[in-house]
Image (cartoon, rainbow, N blue to C red):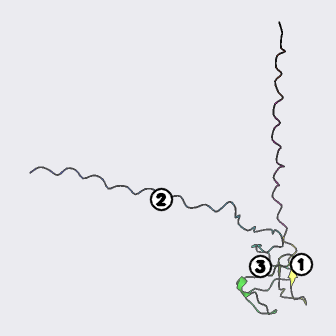
Amino acid sequence: LCPSPPSAPPALAPPSPPPASPSPLAPPPPIGCYTGNGADYQGEAATTASGATCQKWSSQSPHIHDHSELGDHNYCRNPDGDSSPWCYPTTGSERFEHCTQIPLCPSPPSAPPALAPPSPPPPVPSPPLVLS
């Protein structure tokens, strides 16, 4: 009997593609500052302009409201498109207060103005005609 030919090693699976990177067109929302009216603010500021602690969004006391979906935290938010992030204070007579200690995010540097295309080079003069 002839010996069996050696078996080939098993084929290797092709490598997995690298994980997709986040889209450069959709930066994550800022954390410690806000842009525009703060509708995208996701930071942890929880004190109003007067110094009152913010009420948890999941609580209906001392203020009854329609924003429980914001979660079990008391961070300033802007769920209704007001002028800046705000919350319901746990003390005082105000129904809601803005959180003025949150800074506006610095504006990204603007792109430099587009440069005009270069001018074409001047025409090369022709040598003078010599008539004989």
Choose the circle earlier in sequence order: 3 or 1.
1
Q: Position of residue 79 (x, y in %)?
A: 78, 81
Give me the C-alpha separation between circle 1 and circle 2: 51 Å
Position above or below: 9 against 77: above
Name the disc covering residue 85, or none. none
Give me the C-alpha separation between circle 3 and circle 2: 40 Å
Residue, far top: 132
Q: Secondary structure at mark 1?
A: loop
Q: Residues within 10 Å of mark 1 (few under 14, many from 20)?
A: some
Choose the circle earlier in sequence order: 3 or 2.
2
The residue at the point 82 percent across, 92 percent down is: 63
Position above or below: 5 against 78: above
The answer to whether residue 117 is left or right of residue 17 is right
Mark 2: amino acid = Ser
Q: Secondary structure at mark 2?
A: loop
Choose the circle earlier in sequence order: 1 or 2.
2
Q: Residues within 10 Å of mark 2 (few under 14, many from 20)?
A: few
Q: Which residue is mark 2?
A: 16
The residue at the point 85 percent across, 67 percent down is: 104
Q: Secondary structure at mark 3?
A: loop
Position above or below: 20 against 83: above
* Residue 72 seen: no
Question: In the rendered structure, which segment of residues is drawn in magenta?
Answer: 104-121
Mark 1: amino acid = Ala
The residue at the point 73 percent across, 87 percent down is: 68
Q: Position of residue 34 (x, y in %)?
A: 81, 69
Mark 3: amino acid = Tyr
Q: Which residue is mark 3?
A: 75
Q: Which residue is mark 1?
A: 49
